[in-house]
Amino acid sequence: MSAFRGVVVVVEHDGDRILSHLETLAAAACRVADGNDQKVCAVLVGRRVARLAAEVAAATGWDVTGIENDALILFNTEQHKAVLAQYFACRTPEWLFMAHSAAAQELAPALAMRLGGGCVTGVQAAAAEDGRVVLKRPVFGGKLVATVVPEVRPVVVTLLPGAGGDAVPPPAAPGRVEVITAACPPVAARVIGRRSAETTGAAITEARTIVAAGNGIGSREQLDMVSALARCFPRSAVAGSRPVCDRGWLPHSFQVGLTGTTVRPDLYIACGISGAFQHVAGIREAGFIAAINRDPQAAIFQVADVGIVADLAEFLPVLIEVLGENRKEALNHEGHEEHEGEKTENGDE
Amino acid sequence: MKILVCIKQVPEPEARIEPAPDGRSVQVAGEACRMNRYDACALECAVRLKAAATVPVTIHAVTVGPDGADVVLRRAMGMGADAAAHLVCTRDPFLSPYVVAEALAHYARKAAYDLILCGVVSEDMMQGITGPILAEHLGLPAACSVMTVRFWDDGAGVDIEKEVEGGVQVAMALPLPALLSIQSGVYQPRYPSLSRLLKAAGAVVETFPVQSEAAPRQRISHVGAPSAKVTARFLEGSLEQKARALQHLLAGQGVL
């Protein structure tokens, strides 16, 4: 049996709100802890964290430790690495869980190194099977799933939303809250400030149908075809995945995903989008997802309701024609012109 | 000023990838491999920093990989790296990032690099931890998902902007030496120039056996297809049949 005991969840916050997806962390931590007969607790690091610590204790039932220092004003990973490594040095748990976030990307591997442990990032399923913890994570753009066996302890794990499986029932009683003051050694890296994203095109947050272009469109010219497809739908907009926006084919304000915009259309048509989890995170709440991709292994087909394996350059003109015919027929049948409320907002116009 | 860019070779993104019969490794259709996209962005960042610098800058590219991995190093030289080193290891699709990071650290200690750049994540294993582990080995401050880098006028540090959730950019100042992992976006990799590629083809890429005593700290016990519980319903037939079937489905969803 490992000399390290327990599961500790490091909860991320912005000083005002909890940022981590607590349901995911709670479900994963409970599954791993129960399977190993261990206890779960949580830590929050910041300038003033008593209120947030109490919030976590109430939501999860865990005992929560708030670690405070007046120097922790702006989130600076170098400070958090130092404070957490110091805190855990003499009470190292077997498992440290964090939400998979930009902060965790910097913090998790460094903290694991300072504690002499290992780090497994982007875990999509964490559970205990026969007393052994099983961590599954997407690899090769989500085409395959690898089961990772950590061989050292502690293990710092970053969890994708939903990684704990079904939600656990709410706690019978809140956990205890303890707030301590920790030393914060000076660090050389300074945080200067934050800049908000470019204003998001209202079109993609309000559209009922989004036609999104991915790397698979191949060339900027193909965007015309994507726009033409969008025009087949009322209240539609064009959006893009990261590679398309990176190339400047669409502005970054049209980027859907973890670091872009989260969208909630009734219909999302993914054209040539591979379906990396960073993109999929932005379309979880879409009503119906249709995916068109020439790669039958593309991960987008794991989240789509309907899939079409085809070359976009060949398929989109056919689809546009079929949808166009249908629209004409419907209008003729109803015997009136397109009513004024139907307005197509195309992102690239 | 010396910049080290760490580069990984990955399979072509659209290559057919299957779990191997042993269930513990993978089979990739074709041998084609290319430079990890984010590492190409890191190299582009280095080349632009060099062009903008007021002091001489040298760019070294390094990779840890099996025989043949020097292909990506020659491309790196074509894009603007001044020299390249290949740390040769056995062919292993799941080489532990702990082994790779220690090998890179061993190499990086040979020269006093002011700045070490990596891609934010590899397209194949998608862990994003080799860079931060390397920074810990070398005791360097690190920032991940970096979008822009600018040297201070005195060359003693860098101002960076990094990307966090919701498209927010965080501005930081880091003294050098430091390690940055570069996100795609601003630094769209250039095409290698023909003259540089020709020169790179004949250039000597230094090779060293991987020196890493590191324990792997993790292993892959199984690789498989994603669980089939949620898979799209695939539409079959000719292009027109697929289009009509989709139109029918969308009409049923009330979105037309």
Image (spheres, coloured by chain):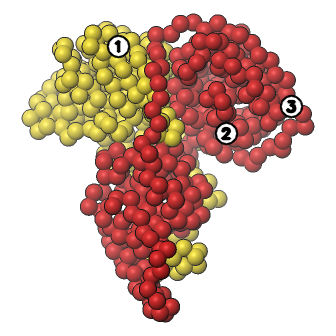
Chain colours: A red, B yellow
Q: Which mark is residue A62?
A: none
Mark 2 and mark 3 on one chain: yes
Expressed as whole percent of the image width and height from the top left, the position of residue B106 reads 39, 13
- Whole-Å distance between the Cαs marked 1 and 2? 35 Å
Q: Assess disc 3: are there few (<14), some (14-19) or many (≥20) residues with their C-alpha within 10 Å of its C-alpha.
A: some
Name the residue type under label 3.
Pro
**Is A281 or B214 nearer to us in this picture?**
A281
For marks 3 and 1, give the CA distance: 46 Å
In the drawing, does residue A319 fall left or right of residue B40? right
Q: Chain of mark 1?
A: B
Among all residues in the image, which is located at the extreme left?
A: B195
Q: Position of residue B139 (x, y in %)?
A: 46, 10
Percent of width and height locating residue B22? 54, 45
Label 3, secondary structure: give it. loop
Q: CA distance from mark 2 to mark 3?
A: 18 Å
Say which residue appears at 75% left-offset and 26% top-offset: A51
Q: Which residue is mark 1?
A: B157
Query: In the displayed structure, does residue B35 sit left or right of residue A127?
Result: left
> Residue at position x 45%, y 49% from top?
A200
Q: Which mark is residue A21?
A: 2
Name the residue beneath numbered marker 3: A174
Residue B65 occupies quadrant: top left
Query: Which residue is depicted at the point 52% across and 44% down?
Result: A258
Secondary structure of the residue carrying numbered label 1 = strand
Quadrant (top left, top right, bottom left, bottom right) of the N terminus of chain B: top left
What amino acid type should be assigned to the residue bearing mark 2?
A: His
Q: Give residue B76's quadrant in the image.
A: top left
